[in-house]
Image (tube, grey):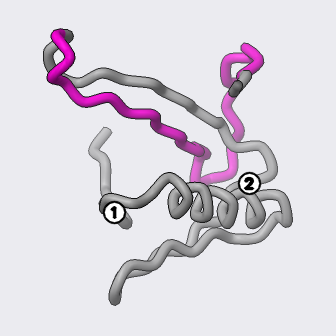
């Protein structure tokens, strides 16, 4: 299935700035509000359902000798038609 990128933003930010963005998204999710992403003249508004699939990944790209890139990815997924899929039931812990 082809992927269509609706919005993308990538920039270096301080940890505090990133935390502020994540808090804003968390507040919107908690309130049941839509999430609008804006950068320059581009914007997209998404309305996550009450129970989207929440995926968390830690990855290493490239060589394992310490010269690769590390990442933590947080992703919310849901079907546009509203049909809910069963996700894994493992309890996520963030320490």
Please state, as top left, top right, bottom left or bottom right, where the N terminus lies in the image: top left
The secondary structure that dominates the magenta segment is loop
What residue would you read off at disc 1? Answer: 8
Which residue sits furthest right? 31
Give the image location of residue 8, x and y in percent: 33, 63
Answer left or right for 41 relative to 63.
right
Residue nearest the viewer, comparing 9 with 33 = 9
At 74% across and 54% down in the image, what residue appears?
49
Which numbered disc covers residue 72? none
Residue 70 lies within the magenta run: yes
Q: Nearer the viewer, mark 1 or mark 2?
A: 1
Residue 17 lies within the magenta run: no
Residue nearest the viewer, comparing 40 with 69 = 69
Q: Give the quadrant of residue 90.
A: top right
Q: Give the quadrant of residue 46.
A: bottom right
Answer left or right for 2 relative to 44.
left
Answer left or right for 39 relative to 32.
left
How many neighbours does mark 2 have within 10 angstroms: few (below 14), some (14-19), or many (20 or more)? some
Which residue sits furthest top? 65
Instruction: Assign a secondary structure to mark 1.
Output: loop
Please state, as top left, top right, bottom left or bottom right, where the C terminus lies in the image: top right
- Extent of the magenta region: 65-92
At 34% across and 86% down in the image, what residue appears?
40
* Vertical side of 63 occupied by 37: above or below: below
Instruction: Assign a secondary structure to mark 2.
Output: loop
What residue would you read off at disc 2? Answer: 49
At 31% across and 48% down in the image, what residue appears?
3
Give the image location of residue 58, x and y in percent: 45, 24
How many neighbours does mark 1 have within 10 angstroms: few (below 14), some (14-19), or many (20 or more)? few
Residue nearest the viewer, comparing 84 with 13 = 13
């Amino acid at each position: 299935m082809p992927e269509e990128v609706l919005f993308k933003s990538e920039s270096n930010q301080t940890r505090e700035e990133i935390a502020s963005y994540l808090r804003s998204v968390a507040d919107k999710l908690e309130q049941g509000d839509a999430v609008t992403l804006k950068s320059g003249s581009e914007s997209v508004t998404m309305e996550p359902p009450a129970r989207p699939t929440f995926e968390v990944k830690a990855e290493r790209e490239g060589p394992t000798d310490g010269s690769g890139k590390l990442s933590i990815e947080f992703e919310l997924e849901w079907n546009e038609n509203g049909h809910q899929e069963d996700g894994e039931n493992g309890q996520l812990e963030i320490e």
